[in-house]
Image: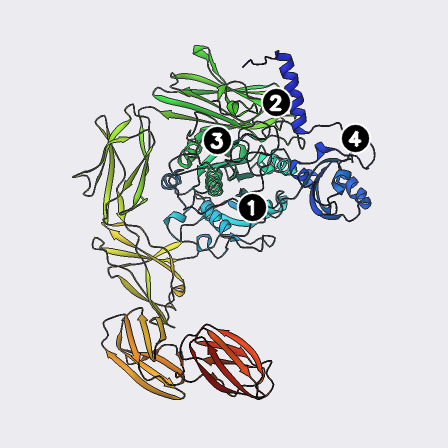
Amino acid sequence: MKMLRLHKPLYIMILFFMMIFVLGISTPVSGQPGEGKLISKISPSLKSLQGQPANTLVVLTIMVRDTKQFLDSMVVLTGTKLLQIYDPANIIIVKTPLSTTNRLAGWDNILFIDHQRKAMEEFFTGTIENETNLVNRMQFAYPAYNANTITVGIKENAFDTADIDFKGRVLINPAASSEISNHATVMGTIAAGGGNTWYATKAAAWGARIVSSSFANLLPDNNNFFQQYSVTVQNHSYGTGIENYYGPEAVAYDMLSASNPALLHIFSSGNSGQSVPPSGIYAGITGFANLTGQFKMAKNILTVGAIDSFYTIAPLSSKGPAYDGRVKPELVAQGEDGSSGSAAIVSGIAAALQQAYRINNSNNLPPSALIKAILVNSANDVGPPEVDFQSGFGSVNGYKAMKMLANGNFTTGSVLPGQEIVYNLTVPAGIRKLKVTLAWNDPPATVNATKALVNDIDLELSYPAGSQTWLPWVLNSFPHRDSLSLPAVRKRDGLNNTEQVTLNNPVPGNYSIRTKGFAISSASQAFALAWQLDAANNFEWNYPQRNDPVLAGQQNVLRWESTLPVSTAVLQYSLDNGNSWQVISNSADLSPGYYKWIAPLVYSKALVKITNAGNDYRTDTVVISKRLNLSVAFNCPDSFMLFWPRVQAASQYQLYKLGSKYMEPLQLLADTSIVLQKNNNSSLYYAVAPVIGGREGVRSFATNYTDQGVQCYFRSFYAERINNTARIQLELGSLYNINSITVQKIIGRDTFLLQTISNPSSLQYTFTDVNLQNGLNQYRVYLGMVNGSRIYSDIIPLYFSVEEQLFIFPNPVRQGASFSVVFNERHNGELQIIDINGRILQRLAVATDIIQLPATKLPAGIYLLRLAGYRIPVKTAKLVVY
């Protein structure tokens, strides 16, 4: 087949006109507000509604040049209602008939028209896990940096403010959504959970305050919200459809970030990674440009995709590029079932970084561009080498990010148009990789701009002694799948406001980091730089750290970072402080950075080590254990009893209670149970951990002792009919201080002894009553206590009727009240209500042994009730209504 070859100028011209066609650019219409039609002013998602009836009411998001002029002109729009004004970006939201859209597009004052889409939670069902992104190591190495001076916002439906992982740290926003969402609660826990429920719910920002705001409005919250609640990190784990344009919401978020330098917005990329974008220059390309929401096209936010626990990019995670070819997502993080949790992990780490900076910089907050630069620069490269449209700059590494901040491997500055600023960096010997990242908060572009970047700063790394220069890594953004899949190359970046240069195996010496104001439209542009030097021939354990739980008999993922020249090693563990070792693998591959290990089913202190080229690399001493189950024995008016299984290797047990914010040690016990007096123990939540060789094992889940279905000794007590007898089942929570168990039967006002058990030895008993009375039979148990007192159960009913009869109660029944009909066994038949003239007034299907009926439609009088059905003997009874 012959290929048509185009001359280069002709090819460029054709491509230009194709882009014009795809983007829908048209010539502006001038004049007064009128009936002009400007398709370029109408968003792709709004265009998709054009086939609906003209009188369909829609909510429009309109960006204007002059708000007052638009409000004055609204009088000519029939049926249009003003809903909201977002002053910072001249955005107005109205409800209006769909037919108004084209009319509005002709107004010169209007820049762009979109419609309000419904935000949807990005699906999440996975577990919370802190090890993949090294939150565990960050917490161990930097325990003081828990974000306790920071407020994290969760923008979506409301989280559960009563969740114990937020205790004492919730700020109430009256404007938050009225709908409480489990998704929002999980997102809040991943970002800022306090670790009260279990160890896995302790987030990076476990000390942060947390506040909710609604995503019913996709525009940013008003400035006064962020100021009132001191929010400096806001998590957005939601999306709409795939939207590839720079819309009003993207403009608003860029504007908000540019005017609030410390405020960082973090978005999930979306869960449409295998979908095809319907519009924009990347329309029809499967697996690219499928971020869910035009607000994610903003430049000054962070967009986070999903990886699994083994650093594989999740297929469902939405991919870049942004509508104009920019790198999206910038980062990825662990999210087994979606990018929601990925964003929340990064939000928590970002909040912890903000607090660390604040502590060490006279209580000043860091610019959000600096936090972005640090997060991007410290990320581990995953997926294709260097930057890519699937994982951005890599997988977030909480420990490295905090280490970079703590070590001061960053700077901030400001560049003038055409100005070049040079920073010197000394690289010592033995460095495997040098990485430098530049980031800045760019001014907002014009709505629906074909390119979002306004101020362009260039980054360059040079080695003057060798006359060598390295430019940033840049991706091919041409709208073709093959082009988007190409690896990054070194060249000048004129598209992104985050740029990165890396250099493998740099020679030692003095290097220069150059930043230049290539095209600055404002007076100056602030920026942030971060750098990192990774050592060669180095091995570090990431999990387990000293305080990390190792779950006995379950799969644990051992994690490390290795730049050792030999990629295989012997992996072993020891349960006797290193005196003897058990082999896990004789040839563990170091290159993935992890190994799946099923720990032995023991309760023991342990060591794990890697042996490579004759060198041992050991973990700290950790504890292998199972999670204990804390149970409730009884919950009486004055006291309650907790108990747990005995662990042979445990010398003691540490009991915890929920304090004002966190789980606090209550008592160290040698026994496996405790009775607590309520007047001295107001907390409802308790947990327990085994103490093994002076170290705590895995703590139990926090248990609310009032929610376990255990009352004062009685766990369950019920009666069921078996033919013509009653079987009574009793289960107790404990035998503590019980001398005897007595079962009573109650008929009317009379009480009869059914059975007594002295010195009981079991928690479960079955009693039988063979003398059932027609009608209502009732049972009760009382416990004879050591001190002579009695503890009574509730009274439980059992209804019975003899074979030939129906039993009705109450009978007579007051007109307008209800009555019940009891059959001697479960039936599938028909119950008829017949008056004294023989007329059948009601027919009721019967599929049980008791039904309740209202007497509201029955006048006073005498009625016959008759049960009939296939192979059912006819049974009758009289009912008196008065």
Residue count near mark 1 (Cα–Cα under 10 Å), binned few <14, some 14–19, many ≥20: some
Q: Position of residue 491 (x, y in %)?
A: 52, 18
Crowding at dot 4, Cα within 10 Å, few <14 / some 14-19 / many 20+, comes out as some
Q: Are marks 3 and 1 in contact (CB under 8 Å)?
A: no
The residue that disc 3 covers is: 390
First along the sequence among labels 2 and 3: 3
Q: In the rendered structure, are the residues bearing label 2 and label 4 in contact, judged by CB atoms less than 8 Å apart?
A: no
Mark in front: 2 vs 3: 3
**Pick the front one: 542 or 409:** 542
Give residue 137's quadrant in the image: top left
Q: Earlier in the sequence, mark 1 or mark 4?
A: 4
Please identify, in this view, whether the residue under mark 2 or under mark 4 is nearer the observer: 4
Question: Label 2 belongs to which residue?
Answer: 416
Q: Are marks 2 and 1 in contact (CB under 8 Å)?
A: no
Kindly identify which numbered label has been placed on residue 29.
4
- Per the model, the C-alpha gap separating discs 3 and 4 is 40 Å
The residue that disc 1 covers is: 120
The answer to whether 99 is drawn above or below residue 741 in the figure is above
Q: Amino acid at mark 2?
A: Leu
Q: Residue furthest left?
A: 579
In front here: 852 or 454? Answer: 852
Residue 545 visible in the displayed image: no
3D distance between C-alphas at marks 2 and 4? 37 Å
Compute the Cα span from label 1 to label 4.
Answer: 36 Å
SS for dot 2: loop
Q: Could you tell me how far apart the alpha carbons at marks 2 and 1 are, in whole angstroms?
A: 42 Å
| Of callouts 3 and 1, the N-terminal one | 1
Q: Secondary structure at mark 3?
A: loop
| Residue 626, x across and y down, in percent | 28, 51
Q: Amino acid at mark 4?
A: Val
